[in-house]
Amino acid sequence: MSETASDVEPVTRRDHEASWSGNLEGPEHAANRELVVEQAKGAIDATATGFHVNLVTHGEHGHPESYLWDELEAAFDGIRFEYVDRCGCGGHVTRVHVDD
């Protein structure tokens, strides 16, 4: 059974008035792409204007541009993406800037 967002601890428990990283590469994320998308949205919501969040996604789903970026662009105005790099563990880092 795939875990839903309500079954998994959120990647953030507070608002961030600084740049920060959200870890979306746990085994529960590898098993559930929808969870990655939902928690990425929560991470962006928790990031103050003028800062960024580094979304670290599981390598199981491939490059985040192929499944995540369009979802986030549809949900938010005023964000920009920057692909940072592939992690040594196989995941991907996308920096999402939350602009004015």
Image (spheres, rainbow, N blue to C red):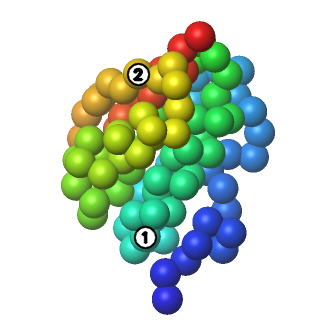
What residue is drawn where x is 41% and y is 22%?
A: 80
Q: Which numbered disc covers residue 80?
A: 2
**Is residue 90 rendered to the left or right of residue 36?**
left
Give me the residue at 65% from left, 36% from top. 45
Label 1, label 2: how far apart the Cα atoms are = 24 Å
Residue 29 vs 62, above or below: the answer is below
Residue 88 lies left or right of residue 16; in this view the side is: left
- 49 vs 41, left or right, is right
Whole-percent x, y for residue 52 in the image: 52, 23
Q: Of label 1 and label 2, which has the lower sequence position?
A: 1
* Label disc, if present, on residue 97 of the rendered structure: none
Residue at x 45% of width, y 28% of height: 96
Residue 82's spot in the image, x, y percent? 33, 24
The x, y position of residue 20, in whole percent, is: 57, 30
Above or below residue 46? Residue 56 is below
Kind of residue at disc 1:
Asn
The image quadrant where one finds the C terminus is top right
Q: Secondary structure at mark 2?
A: strand
Graded by Cα atoms within 10 Å as few (under 14), some (14 to 19) or many (20 or more), the crowding at tag 2 reads: some
Let me know if residue 80 appears in the view: yes
Residue at the image point whose x is 67% and y is 62% from the top: 9
Q: Quadrant of residue 10?
A: bottom right
Residue 32 spot, x, y in % from top left: 43, 70
Q: Residue beneath label 1, please?
A: 32
Residue 23 position (above or below residue 98): below
Q: Residues within 10 Å of mark 1 (few under 14, many from 20)?
A: some
Quarter-wise, where is residue 70 in the image? top left
Can the viewer see residue 88? no
